[in-house]
Amino acid sequence: MAGETTGAGGTISTVGVVGLGTMGAGIAEVFARGGLRVVAVEITAEALEHGRATLARSTDRAVERGRLSAADRDGLLGRITFAVGLPALAEVDLVVEAVPERLDLKRRLFADLDRICRPTAILASNTSSLSVTEIAVATGRPDRVVGMHFFNPAPVMKLVEVVRTVTTSTEVVGAVQALCARLGKVGVTIGDRAGFIANALLFGYLNQAVAMVESGYASRAEIDAAMRLGCGLPMGPLALLDLIGLDTAYEILDTMYRRGGRDRRHAPVPLLRQMVTAGLLGRKSGQGFYRYERPGSAAVVPDGQTPLAAPPDGARPVRRVGVVGTADAVTGLGELFGQAGYDVLVVSRDAGRTGGLAGLADADLVVEAVADELAAKQALFAELAEVCKPEVLLATTTGTLPVIDIAMAARRPAEVVGLHLIDPTRAGAVVEIVRTVRSSAEAVATARAVCAGLGRTGVVCGDRAGFVVRALLFPYLNDAVRMLEASYASVDDIDHAMTLGCGYPAGPFEVLDRLGPEVVLRLQRSLYRESREPGLAPAPLLEQLVTAGRRFRDRAAG
Ligand SMILES: NC(=O)c1ccc[n+]([C@@H]2O[C@H](COP(=O)([O-])OP(=O)(O)OC[C@H]3O[C@@H](n4cnc5c(N)ncnc54)[C@H](O)[C@@H]3O)[C@@H](O)[C@H]2O)c1
């Protein structure tokens, strides 16, 4: 029957949504789009008006973009009743709650819903990190309480994590899964664990990106550009935090820290707390890591850092570029610089075959790409220091060795930087410009100008293992392996959670297999050695797969 979903637990035709903030307004829209009648509830008339306006804006935008006809919009909005206070929910079949992420608040709310709603009604929480079990036992019907975790923005993201506690009945899970299917969503049923699948993998990464901003390791806009362009993510971590809301993100991290084994990577970075206290909540307040046209808007107002700053003054002119390295590497790099109009001199240095460096005497820039071994690189930089002119920029393309160890061998460390090219053939691709504690401002400015000259996106960062992209990406991959190891979710469920819930182009296991588990393990070991952070220790299953020479998807198949 139109407008109804029948599960073993009965028929769902009218749903309630409590809290019409960042998530609730979108969830109400999803239900109304799916043909259900919706009772949308807020705590005050003002908040209700705000929620109604959010829904109107979102559906108007869908009409403008041709995703919804005007008649369908009117029909959709006509199915929603707005009300202040919970008594309006007396007759609904299911309620989804999306009030702030605080356990005491949710437990009180569920106790009230239990009194007000029909005994057969299903009570669902959109919590990201709190224990659904603890919420359920605040009611007299814990068998009818479930987690229904939507993703932001709810109308766009396909995933719903359906959280089943030890008390949730099978028929309730079945009814909620049927409802997800009817809404065009993909429901993944999982147990009640802090952060479920997606947030357990996402929030350590987001927090670490904030730590990078706080410590001045790299700038806000460059970190975001690095993750968008270097990993193909739909948005960078700081822009995503602005979308989530910094207050909500703070509460999620705080809960994950307490519930998830006190992993320090989830202890909210102090900068987050300061921003929340200062009212810098992200898009919803009009300013977070970025400034927006007005509260609720997605349009970023340009400032000193956004769009990315032009190369600063002080760059030295670069015309002649020497490229020294293995045959494969120098061919690629030679083409890259040649196509950008530089005069290129290529010196091939494969094992047992060493070209001379004399031709590099008047190079403005020398880029090194020999085998990734410290001794080989140090020997080459010592030779370059003898041959090159004093004001040359010397760059190493290493992705795994500390740049300062190489720079010191050159005896002119001020002129040495790292230039770590990620997927370099792609226009706009990221180049991590690694500034050591000895790099001069001119050297860094020159490197920036060279990246701009190549049509690539330069991201200046400090000299730590993994630089920006892999320091943020690999711990997340390692965490996915730990989750698999704990048998919390399957390879497919974890990959789906990140693609369908967060819009990632590929899930962590697809990425691990593509990069090679051995590559990830090697750098993860460096990250762990450098930081001594227990949460960064390589997952035993990752070690085992590398030892066995297998990939994650072979393992799943076998
Ligand atoms: N923000 C996200 O990206 C995101 C994603 C998935 C899940 N969640 C979860 O969704 C929930 C809501 O988060 P949010 O970011 O939408 O929060 P929000 O602060 O944007 O919105 C919360 C809304 O709840 C209302 N509210 C507060 N107390 C209420 C009450 N007693 N009765 C009715 N309404 C009340 C507030 O007025 C506000 O409009 C949290 O549990 C959060 O963890 C958030």
Image: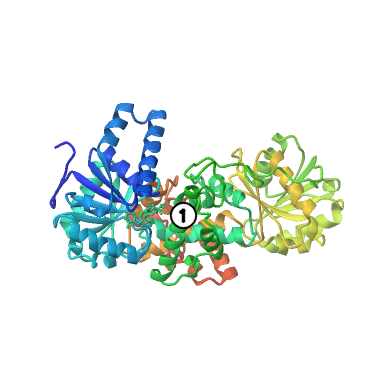
Picture quadrant of ligand 1: bottom left
Where's residue 343, x and y in %?
78, 37
Residue at 33 percent of width and 59 percent of height: 489
**Quadrant of image for the C terminus:** bottom left
Going by the image, does 352 lie left or right of 14? right
Q: Quadrant of residue 411?
A: bottom right
Regarding residue 466, the answer to whether it shows in the image is no
Where's residue 78, x and y in %?
26, 35
Near-viewer residue (49 or 257): 49
Going by the image, does 204 lie left or right of 12? right
User: Label 1 amino acid?
Assistant: Leu
Q: Does mark 1 have its CB less than 8 Å from ligand 1?
A: no
Where's residue 283, x and y in %?
49, 47
Q: Secondary structure at mark 1?
A: helix
Where's residue 12, x and y in %?
17, 46
Residue at 47 percent of width and 44 percent of height: 296
Residue at 18 percent of width and 65 percent of height: 140
Location of mark 1 (residue): 512
Going by the image, does 19 lie left or right of 143? right
Residue at 43 percent of width and 59 percent of height: 201
Q: Quadrant of residue 441?
A: bottom right
Q: Quadrant of residue 58?
A: top left
Regarding residue 280, the answer to whether it shows in the image is yes
Near-viewer residue (60 or 47): 47
188 versus 317 height, above or below: below
